[in-house]
Image (cartoon, rainbow, N blue to C red):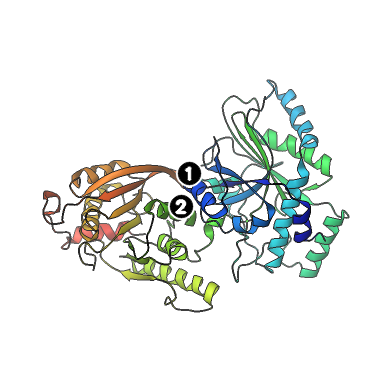
Amino acid sequence: IVSGAHIMQELDEAVTIGATVPTGFEHTAAEEVQEKLEATARVSKNRGRIYFDITTDTLFKVHQLKSLDNLFVVVKDYDDYQFKTTKEEVQLDWQELAAKLPWTNALEVWKLNNSIKKRKGRRKRTNPTKSDQCGNFSTKSTDTVPSDPEELWVDLESLEVKENQRDVSSQPEDDSEEEKHSEIQDQESGVTPLKFRVTCNRAGDKHCFTSNDAARDFGGAVQEFFQWKADMTKFDVEVLLNIHNNEVVVGLALTVESLHRRNISHFGPTTLRSTLAYGMLRLCKPQVSDVIVDPMCGTGAIPLEGVMEWQNSFFLAGDNSGTAVSRSVNNIKHILKRTHDGGSSSGLPLDIVQWDLCNLPMRSSSVDIIITDMPFGKRMGSKKKNWELYPLCLREMARVCKPGTGKAVLLTQDKKCFLKALSQMEGLWRKSHTVWVNVGGLHAGVFVLKRTAVVFGTTSEDVMEPHTATGSQKENMKDASQ
């Protein structure tokens, strides 16, 4: 077997890594790449993707980045691919392309990536969900930009370097380790052909072909060129064909499960993706000793992501739902067991509380940052109830947030209701900017607010006491809880 060290010695030149990120957070992800890898990331014309160059010795660090969903190594990219005008000509083009591409470096990176995975020991297989599947060689495909970047691939396994994480094999679960090891040896020695699939994602209205056509024709050419065996479910190699207007990128997938699943083991009905939570936290720019509050924490995605990255800040999270609080606590325990082999939350600067959102058990002007995923009024709560809930939320947030320096980063899809509530609170909050994101197919906004210097209790906006919410208001909060 070719060792990872041997590959690194042979592969001196830089390789290009592509990554999918939550749409709207491309530049935030690029900042993290610059900060942690000292690499300059390029934002794709196709939203939700970035590209950056690395040397192979830093590949393991790429898996540790918090902003990235799925990773792939670029075989070749074309900024302005000249597609032919007829289906037949395009078909010939795809068939010829496979033989022209510089596969060698990308395949060496793919092997190195596998060796990193093998060194981490056996991890348990996870099954892809229906929503994760998309266009591939000989199966259905997507012809528009997916609502969520994770839809581009079959759900693949994270290779992040962490204890007790489990490996994914493309073989059936009852295969023995020896059989798998033997098959890998055979594959790398050329005895047994690798199994592969081509996944195509196409966007643009000037193509004379579908993504299914492209996946089929290009997949056939790849099969003929490498003599690999096509297998849509138990594949060893996933070849990616991404087409956005005239931009074409061919790559090899490096992740088996989207990295956004890293910290959550107990999911709720509207659990926020960890990558999106991380992007929101970066917008806050947390500082040492900041008190950061998530008043509607749901399963705890935001505080859990925050506490893993900004351990010199203190995170306080709560929800009025006892079920949500229990899920958050279980997710904390899961992380502690994974990292410290412990069962309590004492090892993290984080507390979880069950509370009344409109009557937070906190002193006025005591919080530096408020960050939360507000009810959209879709799967949780209702838009009608949001009209009453949102002003109460903003008022109570203004009470506990430090005047002049406090910040809030709030995610919601109910933009009309939120902006109306914000206009009612203009004496207490100022909108800094908005990041538009895609959350499970819904067009949502991350609103970055700054607390004005006005002291709570001195403006007309806070005449109504938020601490004595009516029964109907409490019912609204219960329905809207995550």
How far from the left and from the top, in percent, is residue 43?
Answer: 54, 40
Q: Is residue 235 at all visible to an observer of this figure? A: no
Q: In this view, does 97 lie to the left or right of 423?
A: right
Helix, strand or loop at mark 1: helix
Nearer to us: label 2 or label 1:
1
From what the image shows, is residue 402 above or below residue 50?
Answer: below
Labelled pair 2, 1 in contact (Cβ < 8 Å):
no
How far from the left and from the top, in percent, is residue 439?
Answer: 44, 47
Amino acid on which the number 1 mark rests in the picture: His
Residue closest to the far right: 191
From what the image shows, is residue 173 above or below residue 96?
Answer: below
Residue named by callout 1: 27
Q: Is residue 149 at all visible to an observer of this figure? A: yes
Nearer the observer, 228 or 447? 447
Question: Toward which corner of the image does residue 220 lie, by quadrant?
Answer: top right
How far from the left and from the top, in percent, is residue 378?
Answer: 37, 49
**Other residues around mark 2 within 10 Å, as few (<14) / some (14–19) / many (≥20):** many
Q: Is residue 17 left or right of residue 396?
A: right
Dot 2 or dot 1, earlier in sequence:
1
Report the residue at 83% width, 51% height from top: 193
Quadrant of image for the N terminus = bottom right
Quadrant of image for the C terminus = bottom left
Report the residue at 31% width, 61% height from top: 295
Measure the C-alpha gap from mark 2 to mark 1. 13 Å
Q: In this view, does 460 lie to the left or right of 282?
A: left
Residue named by callout 2: 276
**Other residues around mark 1 within 10 Å, as few (<14) / some (14–19) / many (≥20):** some
Nearer the observer, 5 or 416? 5
Question: Toward which corner of the image does residue 317 lie, by quadrant?
Answer: bottom left
